Amino acid sequence: MALATDTIESEVQRLGRKLYQQAAQNKPSLFESRDLLGRMIDWSLDDESLRVALFRFVDVLPSLESSSEIGRHLEEYFTRVDHALSGLAILANVLHAGTVVAPLVKRNVIKLARRFIAEESGNHLPSVLSSLRKEPAAFTIDLVGEATVSEAEAVVMQQRYLDIMRRLAGVSAKWPECSQIDQSSSGKIPRVNVSVKLSSLCARFDALDPNTEAIVCRRLRELFRRAAQLGAAVTVDMEQNDFRELTLDIFRRVLEEEEFRVQPYAAIALQAYLRDSEHDVTALIRWARAHQRRIGVRLIKGAYWDNEIAWAKQKDWPIPVFLEKAATDASYERLSRLLLEAHDVIDPAFGSHNLRSLAHAIVAAKEIGVPINGYEIQMLFGMAEPVRQAIIRNGQRVRVYLPVGELLPGISYLIRRLMENTSNTSFLRQTYAEKKTVDALIKPPAVAQGQQVEEKHDRQRFYNEAPINFAKLANRQRFAATIEEVRGKGQKRRQPARNDRWLESVNPADPNEIIARVPAATLADTAKAIDNAARFFPQWRATPAADRTEIIFKAAEIMRERRWQLAAREVLEVGKGWREADADVCEAIDYLNYYAHQMLRLADPRETQQLPSETNSYFYEPRGLAAIIAPWNFPLAILTGMTAAALVTGNCALMKPAEQAPVMGEQLLEILRTAGLPQGACQLLQGGGEIGAALVRSPKIHVIAFTGSREVGLEILRESYTHRLGQTHVKRVVCEMGGKNAVIIDNDADLDEAVVHVIDSAFSYQGQKCSAASRVILLPELHDRFVQRLVDAVGSLKIGPPEDPRNALGPVIDADAHKRICEYIQIAKQEANCVLEMAAPEEGFFIGPAIFRDVDPQSRLAQEEIFGPVLAVLKANDFDHALAIANNSQFALTGGIFSRSPAHIEATRREFRVGNLYINRGITGAVIERQPFGGLKLSGIGSKAGGPDYLLQFVEARTVSENTSRHGFVPVERAKN
Ligand code: NAD
């Protein structure tokens, strides 16, 4: 019989109090300050800067080989923190000992790690398991190690799981029966239980790539098969929200197969902090009932809370987690009930250290009629031991989540746990460090009234356009359908507008496919367009800035409405992958909005100084006619950015897209016209370099906005500054050119991150980005390991038409580019050692990625912009040498470093002189306003695109001074502004 809500709550309180009385008697080992690190954790609870320094130090420690390196990092991290706490004085003393304490520190961290991680080899694991069994507590094993970035690593990971299941099946068979952990209400429980992160089973866990599902299903199937043979259990862990849909799909899909209808015992983890979790729980229950498949569900609160918020904010996606801790706690209680009520098909497991949450689940189980062995409680190894003991004493079945692996590579796991348990909202911290009262600890979660409110966007403030979330199936289906839709339209032949000359847009993945034919401009058309613009200019200049910005804002709205089609067209026209194409469209929308906002800032005249009897006003006017000459590699964004800047400031634009991407030019013009832009303000001239050159040479052009190669850029600068007959002004040139961008990998870099980001920076869009990484500079200690992981990981990528999202790599833009890059690869083979040259499809302009090592910093491979999937690996003697190599280039566009040394990061900030420097992240994908973009040296001479100074290049400033007094009469009223 169901109990009334009040009765249940008082039961929860009673049990919570009882458990608390037992648990509060002893401290968990984490909060014991027996050794140096225990003490450091104690101090860090009160001092955020020390906490950050401490965790960052522990994070970098595994990568530090020598004592002197450990000493250097200790000093770098801890001399910077606030020394307010008395404990820090001890620390500071210790630090003076420098390298002497290094081995001691490493020993202590290893000791600390051993409290959270069991070693895979040797006797540590069996001894941990047998002591757990004595408690008695069951276990589930999570294999920790480096992130999986290649197929080879995925195979190793799968093998580790297969091996450990076999090994433990043998060991566990000899254990005497213990009914508290070996029996459930429906029979015998597997003693061997492993927890698997699906992302560890493939090189690239990406919902967009249909191969991910196929590969992971294959590997999971083998794990399930082995588990079924051995009578073991497999729980699928839940990772970040981006992986959630795919993880659930894979879990269900494999279990639906006939072979797995009954065996093995399988479970999945769900996170209560997600706002969608209730939906997932009910869907999973429905699925289990429909398939009559009994499964376990481990309910946890979720371990990626800060990250989920940060990732969502970066992309401007809805925040997937509850922002309030109490809301997560309340969700946990709701979901606990749902799972218990589905006991016919679900075996619930409650993973938490929070006594309130656990007491609630236990009371709810009793009330719903689930026997005590019909569900279990799970806790992390090394944490909350007193809580665990209290729960075991209550007769519950407890399972310990036990990370197993090498101690030092497992540190990232340790960091996550430390962060979690020392955060302000941690139940353990509140219980054992802050000593909150029992009443406060076990009170029901009080959720503040009102929904989590998403920030509303409006015109008042600039915001970045959110990319499409391809982790969602509906979005993937829609994009695939849109490609088909635009393909149908694109293939239609058009009628000539004025002459018989055509420019063809071809699909670089299949040059036989003509995406579109557009009328090509002649030199006569160009001259006529310039005259039209010159005639219209006075009118456009006189148009109020508010009206011009209105049109540009409107264009942004229209572009947003058409974003799917535009991105799909880019996939076909220039061979971009889905995400890359979508990002280009987002950037184009951003340019429109951002420059319109910037224009509002510049529009009104300013009074320079306030004086009696005189007004001094300073204001901007457009320069006149702007030639916009764009490249093909960001075919919509760069064209839109340069054009919008010219138009919104009141110039008339003559827009010349790259000849490889005429469709994007047409689309943009159409959008601007629909937004209400007058004909004369912007004209489109489709064609090649000769049209660009004619614009540049025209004496009627005032400003040239060019983005493209160094060769063309320098020629444009030469031509533009040559005075021509009839020319009454000096032209202004905005010139963004190429790059030869380097990424330094410091000795202490996080290799998991460095490999993934270097691959993305070097090979996404086949390296055809001005910002792409084309040089990687490594220090000797890390060199071979990094190159090996890099080569394995790149070798795991697929090449083919980008409309198929299985392909991480597509074609290069055209036959010329193909020929040029192939020639460079031959040159590189003479200059350096080729460690990877992947095969590529014969049809289409495909080139497999090539990686060269032992590259001479002076060689052509290290100095010239290749603009394709070719990466040079250079070896530096030490960090200063690495910086010198990085700066040894005629270009200075982007650059990056992966390092965990505060001093090296600081030196890089100061000394690595590039336009856009990126630290511990990829070096491409600058976001408008967030990362204004543009290079130094021969990479460019403009003010940064998407930055606050950009529009100034399209205007001229004027100052007007007026004496307002008349024979001693000084008016009181001042002019506006
Ligand atoms: P490109 O220089 O060949 O062509 C760029 C544009 O210039 C095209 O529209 C082309 O038709 C036109 N053009 C060619 N010859 C001309 C001439 N003599 N006079 C006037 N116009 C002429 O470059 P691309 O192949 O389209 O683009 C790739 C290059 O662009 C790479 O070098 C890349 O690094 C650079 N790029 C730089 C940035 C940046 O922001 N710095 C951004 C994107 C691309």
Image (cartoon, helix red, strand yellow):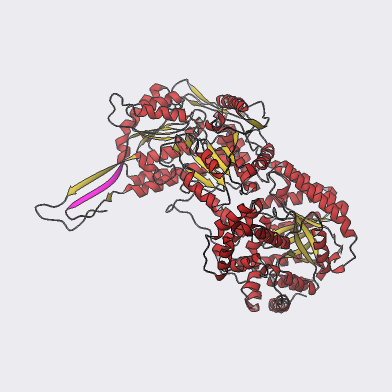
Residue 510: which quarter of the image?
Answer: top right
| Residue 645 location (% of width, % of height) | 40, 40
Which residue corresponds to the image point at 43% horizontal and 23% vertical from the top-left? 690
Q: Is residue 559 visible?
A: no
For the N terminus, give its image quadrant. Answer: bottom right
Residue 599 lies left or right of residue 566; in this view the side is left
Seen from the viewer's position, the closer of residues 757 and 209 is 757
Seen from the viewer's position, the closer of residues 775 and 493 is 775
Q: Is residue 372 visible?
A: yes
Against 57, is 199 above or below? above
Which residue corresponds to the image point at 45% horizontal and 51% vertical from the top-left? 462
* Segment colored magenta: 609-622
Residue 771 drawn in magenta: no
Seen from the viewer's position, the closer of residues 736 and 10 is 736
> In the displayed image of the protein, which residue is found farthest to the top?
500
Residue 617 drawn in magenta: yes
Q: Main secondary structure of the magenta part?
A: strand
Residue 479 lies left or right of residue 608; in this view the side is right
> In the displayed image of the protein, which residue is found farthest to the left?
967
Seen from the viewer's position, the closer of residues 743 and 376 is 743
| Residue 107 location (% of width, % of height) | 69, 59
Residue 832: which quarter of the image?
Answer: top right
Residue 18: which quarter of the image?
Answer: bottom right
| Residue 806 location (% of width, % of height) | 67, 38
Against 194, is 390 above or below? below
